[in-house]
Amino acid sequence: MSRILLVEDDTDVRLAVEHVLLDEGYEVDAAENCQRGRAFLDNHPYDLLLTDGRLPDGTGIGLANIAAYYGIPALIITDHPSVLGALVPDLSR
């Protein structure tokens, strides 16, 4: 069975994706921000990181780099219309 780390700050999206993955038979840990995602990456083995591109305290690229250090592939998801908009922090928050 594959183990996936899901990092998504939108609670509804996180829960929906988590339920789909669990229904498909994956083991899933879920985090709402980079800090918690990093803690999971540092303490557990994963087969995949599935992360939002833009999070309240960083980016999915940052988490993907940490995952790569551990040899974990990453898939970055976003609802932003452009890649740049998805990865550049929103400074208006």
Image: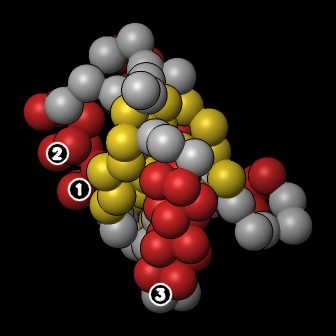
* Closer to viewer: mark 1 or mark 3: 1
Tag shown at residue 39 = 2
* Closer to viewer: mark 2 or mark 1: 2
Mark 3 closeness class: few <14, some 14–19, many ≥20 residues within 10 Å: few
Lateral position of residue 43 relative to residue 17, left or right: left
SS class, disc 1: helix
Lateral position of residue 4 relative to residue 30, left or right: right
Tag shown at residue 35 = 1
Report the residue marked by disc 3: 93
SS class, disc 3: loop
Disc 3 versus disc 2: distance between alpha carbons?
24 Å
Identify which residue is drawn at 46% across, 41% down. Answer: 26
Identify which residue is drawn at 49% across, 42% down. Answer: 25
Q: Amino acid at mark 2?
A: Ala
**Do the CB atoms of the residues marked 2 and 1 lie less than 8 Å apart?**
yes
In this view, 15 is above or below 25:
below
Q: Amino acid at mark 3?
A: Arg
In this view, 10 is above or below 25:
below
Mark 2 closeness class: few <14, some 14–19, many ≥20 residues within 10 Å: few
**Going by the picture, which residue comes out furthest to the left?**
43
